Image: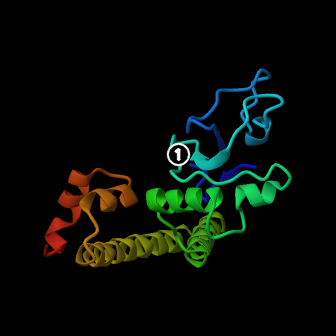
């Protein structure tokens, strides 16, 4: 089973863990799926950990139930490899609430409809208003973040810019 985050930037999976704590290399057929490491076709894994395409590996080793894939993956549990990976993605990417994603998608679609229907000036006015609102709410979010001791590195990451760029952009709006 593979898991993909909302942005498509992180693909999670289970990594088999051997008795010495290491992850085994690919089996003879090139397969790296955790259930291959059952002791018959490849070395026997003693557990699994959450892993991500970005290189992240979870710390905790979780038990394997070779007869129950869902139990091993912990997909519907609050703890387990999936929960570890999901927490990793939340820490790295942050979470945009689904209702906000839907509002933004709706807005993008509506502006496109206005443009396509010959109402380019209306679309431009809406886009300008969205941009202004974005700047204003961004400043408020940064102020709130700094009050909550969010580091400049995290603010920069949220904006896709460096720590220095985030400070240059927002420091005049924030009293540290």
Q: Residue furthest front?
A: 19
- Answer above or below: position of 60 versus 29: below
Frontmost residue, 153 versus 102 = 153
**Residue at the (72%, 30%) spot, across then down:** 43
Display colour scheme: rainbow
Instruction: Specify the quadrant of the image occupied by residue 150.
Output: bottom left
**Residue at the (13%, 73%) spot, across then down:** 176
**Residue at the (61%, 59%) spot, across then down:** 6
How many numbered marks, from 0 up?
1
**Residue at the (47%, 64%) spot, across then down:** 94
- Answer above or below: position of 95 versus 20: below
Q: Position of residue 48 (x, y in %)?
A: 65, 47
Instruction: Please indicate whether residue 150 sits to the left or right of residue 67 in the image.
Output: left
Q: Residue furthest right?
A: 67
Q: Residues within 10 Å of mark 1 (few under 14, many from 20)?
A: some
Instruction: Specify the quadrant of the image occupied by residue 136.
Output: bottom left
Residue that carries the numbered disc 1 in the rendered image: 57
Frontmost residue, 30 versus 59 = 59
Q: Position of residue 145 (x, y in %)?
A: 30, 73
Frontmost residue, 83 versus 100 = 83
Circle 1 sits in a helix, a strand or a loop, which is it? loop
Q: Position of residue 24 (x, y in %)?
A: 64, 31
- Answer above or below: position of 67 versus 33: below
């Amino acid at each position: 089973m593979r898991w993909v985050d909302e942005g498509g930037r992180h693909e999670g999976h289970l990594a088999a863990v051997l008795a010495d704590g290491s992850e085994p290399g690919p089996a003879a057929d090139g397969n790296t799926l955790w259930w291959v490491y059952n002791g018959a076709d490849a070395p026997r894994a003693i557990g699994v950990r959450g892993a991500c395409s970005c290189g992240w590996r979870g710390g905790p080793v979780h038990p394997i139930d070779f007869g129950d894939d869902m139990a091993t993956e912990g997909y519907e549990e609050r703890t387990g490899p999936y929960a570890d990976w999901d927490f990793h993605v939340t820490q790295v990417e942050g979470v945009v609430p689904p209702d906000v994603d839907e509002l933004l998608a709706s807005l993008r679609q509506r502006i496109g409809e206005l443009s396509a229907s010959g109402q380019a000036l209306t679309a431009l006015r809406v886009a300008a208003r969205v941009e202004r609102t974005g700047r204003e709410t961004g400043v408020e979010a940064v102020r709130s973040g700094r009050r909550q001791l969010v580091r400049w590195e995290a603010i920069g990451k949220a904006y896709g810019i460096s720590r220095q760029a985030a400070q240059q952009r927002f420091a005049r709006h924030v009293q540290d």
